[in-house]
Image (cartoon, rainbow, N blue to C red):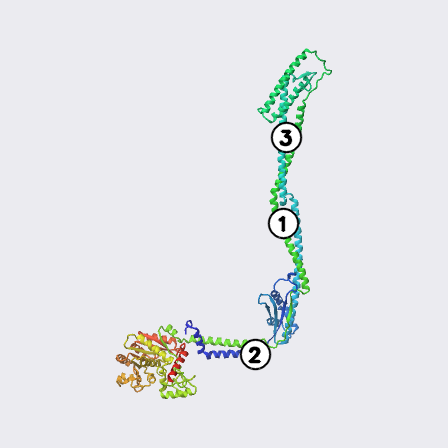
């Protein structure tokens, strides 16, 4: 059997064929399982359920401080409960240590306790939240199991309360420390910001707008000051020009009138202006002199602002020239009158005034001095404004830098502040949670189902052990069966035969006994003696006999002698005729498969008028004679072909028994010339089938040297028969087949399914080396749908008997 070619049905067939082996393994393992159930010590498990109660106060009012999930806390409590310290206390309290126990023995007891404890959690199906958990403990004493389980439950609840209080207190203390650090850091940040603002006052980002407004105001002031300074400067130039022009006009007028000369009087020189001379020489309140002064002032003002070509300047100069001309004429007339009058008295004082200053000039100079003072004041103001503008410009320029520095400080401050506020909120919540835990109003564990005293042992689990024994028995049994099938190396299916041998399979012949599994009373077409035996057997509820058996009523039953079995004795007498299934059970599946093989032989012959077919097998007991007899019967009776069946197996002839004819005269007599060939041929009934038995010459075997004479006999018979079937000896035990193979147009090798070793068949074919057509007929095989087909044909057979 090839493992790569196995199909699902093949696995079932292996189980059916090796059922007793599998049943044996199952019985052994089940027996072992029963022994384990009886000998293993009993163990009782006590269990308690602890409910996880959620916080009584809604979390939107008080948030729990204890972090992690319930599973995490249960795991932490489990570690404490399963610790060696606690388990040692439990062992000492309940006296679980043996007397005088050593440290190693104590460790063993502690480890046993740890293995006997189970903690299982239970949660809602909708989420992963743990709603409850159970703790159990197993011991050989039910009361001990209950007491230890109760102690574990109490310890878990106490550990949970203690753990939660420690966590809350630790959280509160941690938050207090962090609050103190955050407060100090916040104060430092505030001081740093205050120092920064104080150190960079005026350069802060919030003062940029004020600085810009101040800068604009200073620039406007500077512009106004610059304009005023320019006006003052222009006024100063105008005053200087007016004074110069006025003095120049006055000197020119003095030269013309003679009043502008210097006089020497008693060593003192007096400078007299033309206006003074005019006033001295003219009449007080002279309108010409007044008009002249006004025009001179106007000219000085005009020349300070305009050029000499300006029309007003030219007009004023012309009018001044006219007035001076008129005054000069009047001055000349006055001089003539003075010469005619007597000289006046000399003044009492010999000194004349040291200097007579014109009030107009005096006013101009006084105004010039005041203007100079104003110019100096404006220059100082302009300098101060420039310094202030530069200072404010620097403040504005440094504002981005100060803003960046301030942002860093404020960012650190805001982070610190947020951290402080968060810590403050957490601190308040932690204190509330601490009070909540101290009042046991938070999440708690409560015993829902107290520990019970177990009445049913947990182990050994009889059901699991028995099921395990059954499964292991089946597994080992089937594994052994499968291994034996693979190591057997036999051919079971047509596909395997075609793949391994390389030859086509003409038909797969089922077990012969299936053809005789008929209903009670179906014995038509059987020999008279065999029909009576079958009827007697069926009356006892037995199957029909198909091979030699002392008791026909027992033939064919389960455990009886079956055909094609090496352990069966050779069938003799009338019982052997039952192997001719095509004759006695023509409607059976077996007969139908023989017809399939015969039809394929006919089709393979094509237009050949006569065809010699050698039927052989690798070893003895493969069913070649039965197959050759049934094929010959189908060819001669069902297909109407003139057929001759020759029994060439001189050492074990059986064809004559299957066909119900005498063994001699036969082929041996024809070879030695004792009897004519025509007298050696026996017709099977009224059909076209003729049989040439092997014959027997005083119990002497036919010499191999006579085999060539068989070729001559076959050649002579070709002209008379369409098909000549030679029942040849097996290939491996005897040398006859090697000589007979040369006579065949086609060689049929019979392979017994599930019995014949594939190595033997391959070795036989290799030694034979068939040059003509060859094929395989697989006998004793299982055909899919065989049961349905058999029932169908049996029903048809019953109807034909009615």
Q: For the residues carrying marks 2 and 3, which lies nearer the camera in this image?
A: 3
Q: Which residue is mark 2?
A: 39
Label 1 vs 2, first from the N-terminus: 2
In the image, what residue occupies the spot 47% across and 77% down? Answer: 477
- The residues bearing labels 1 and 3 have C-alpha atoms spaced at a distance of 52 Å
What separation in Å lies between label 1 and label 2 (alpha carbons)? 81 Å
In the figure, 386 relative to 33: above or below? above
In whole angstroms, how far apart are the C-alphas of marks 2 and 3? 133 Å
Farthest front residue?
Answer: 287
Within 10 Å of the Cα at label 3, are there few (<14), some (14-19), or many (20+) other Cα atoms?
Answer: many
Q: Nearer the viewer, mark 1 or mark 2?
A: 1
Residue under label 1: 410
Residue 232, label in figure: 3
**Of helix, strand and loop, which one carries label 2?**
helix
Q: Residues within 10 Å of mark 2 (few under 14, many from 20)?
A: few
**Nearer mark to the viewer, of 1 and 3:** 3
| Residue 251: image location, x then y, percent | 63, 20
Residue 721 visible to the viewer = yes
């Amino acid at each position: 059997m090839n493992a790569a070619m196995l199909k699902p049905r093949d696995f079932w067939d292996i189980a059916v064929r090796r059922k007793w082996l599998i049943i044996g393994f199952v019985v052994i393992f089940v027996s072992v399982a029963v022994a384990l159930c009886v000998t293993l010590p009993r163990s009782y498990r006590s269990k308690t359920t602890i409910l996880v109660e959620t916080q009584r106060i809604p979390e939107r009012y008080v948030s729990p401080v204890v972090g992690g999930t319930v599973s995490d806390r249960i795991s932490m409590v489990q570690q404490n409960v399963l610790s060696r310290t606690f388990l040692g206390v439990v062992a000492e309290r309940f006296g679980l240590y043996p007397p005088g126990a050593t440290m190693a023995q104590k460790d063993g007891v502690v480890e046993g306790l740890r293995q006997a404890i189970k903690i299982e959690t239970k949660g809602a199906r909708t989420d992963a939240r743990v709603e409850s958990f159970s703790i159990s403990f197993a011991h050989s004493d039910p009361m001990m199991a209950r007491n230890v389980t109760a102690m574990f439950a109490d310890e878990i609840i106490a550990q949970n309360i203690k753990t939660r209080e420690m966590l809350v207190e630790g959280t509160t203390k941690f938050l207090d420390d962090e609050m103190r650090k955050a407060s100090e850091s916040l104060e430092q940040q505030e001081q740093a910001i205050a120092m920064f603002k104080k150190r960079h006052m005026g350069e802060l980002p919030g003062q940029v707008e004020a600085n810009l407004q101040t800068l604009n105001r200073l620039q406007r002031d500077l512009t106004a000051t610059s304009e005023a300074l320019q006006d003052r400067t222009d006024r100063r130039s105008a005053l200087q020009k007016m004074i110069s022009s006025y003095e120049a006009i006055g000197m020119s007028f003095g030269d013309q009138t003679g009043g502008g000369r210097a006089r020497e009087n008693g060593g003192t020189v007096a400078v007299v202006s033309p206006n003074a001379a005019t006033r001295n020489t003219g009449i007080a309140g002279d309108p010409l002199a007044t008009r002249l002064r006004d025009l001179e002032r106007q000219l000085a003002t005009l020349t300070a602002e305009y050029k000499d070509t300006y029309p007003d300047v030219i007009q004023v100069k012309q009018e001044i020239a006219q007035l001076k001309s008129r005054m000069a004429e009047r001055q000349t007339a006055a001089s003539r009158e003075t010469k005619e009058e007597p000289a006046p008295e000399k003044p009492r004082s010999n000194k004349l005034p040291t200097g007579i200053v014109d009030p107009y000039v005096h006013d101009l100079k006084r105004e010039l001095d005041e203007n100079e003072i104003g110019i100096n004041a404006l220059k100082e103001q302009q300098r101060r404004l420039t310094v202030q503008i530069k200072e404010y410009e620097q403040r504005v320029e440094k504002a981005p830098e100060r803003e960046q520095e301030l942002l860093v400080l404020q960012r650190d401050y805001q982070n610190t502040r947020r951290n402080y506020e968060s810590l403050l909120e957490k601190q308040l919540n932690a204190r509330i949670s601490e009070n909540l835990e101290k009042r046991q109003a938070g999440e708690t564990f409560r015993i829902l189902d107290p520990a019970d005293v177990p009445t049913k042992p947990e182990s050994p689990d009889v059901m699991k052990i028995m099921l395990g024994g059954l499964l292991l028995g089946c597994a080992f049994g089937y594994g052994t069966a499968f291994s034996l099938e693979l190591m057997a190396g036999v051919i079971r299916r047509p596909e395997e035969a075609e793949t391994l041998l390389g030859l086509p399979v003409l038909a797969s012949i089922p077990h012969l006994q299936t053809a005789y599994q008929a209903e009670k009373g179906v014995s038509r077409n059987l020999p008279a003696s065999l029909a009576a035996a079958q009827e007697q057997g069926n009356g006892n509820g037995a199957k029909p006999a198909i091979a030699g058996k002392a008791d026909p009523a027992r033939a064919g039953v389960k455990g009886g002698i079956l055909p094609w079995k090496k352990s069966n004795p050779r069938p003799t007498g009338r019982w052997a005729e039952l192997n001719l299934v095509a004759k006695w059970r023509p409607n059976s599946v077996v007969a139908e498969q023989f017809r399939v093989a015969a039809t394929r032989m006919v089709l393979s012959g094509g237009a050949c008028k006569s065809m010699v077919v050698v039927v052989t097998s690798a070893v003895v007991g493969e069913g070649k004679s039965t197959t050759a007899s049934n094929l010959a019967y189908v060819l001669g009776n069902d297909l109407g072909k003139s057929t001759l069946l020759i029994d060439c197996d001189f050492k074990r002839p059986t064809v004559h028994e299957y066909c119900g004819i005498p063994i001699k005269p036969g082929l041996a007599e024809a070879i030695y010339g004792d009897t004519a060939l025509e007298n050696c041929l026996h017709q099977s009934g009224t059909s076209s089938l003729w049989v040439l038995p092997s014959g027997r010459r005083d119990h002497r075997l036919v010499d191999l040297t006579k085999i060539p004479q068989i070729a001559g006999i076959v050649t002579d018979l070709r002209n008379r028969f369409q098909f000549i079937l030679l029942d040849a000896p097996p290939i491996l035990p005897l040398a006859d087949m090697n000589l007979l193979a040369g006579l065949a147009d086609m060689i049929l090798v019979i392979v017994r399914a599930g019995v014949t070793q594939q190595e033997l068949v391959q070795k036989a074919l290799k030694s034979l080396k068939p040059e003509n057509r060859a094929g395989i007929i697989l006998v004793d095989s299982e055909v899919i749908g065989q049961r349905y087909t058999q029932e169908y044909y049996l029903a048809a057979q019953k109807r034909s008997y009615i």
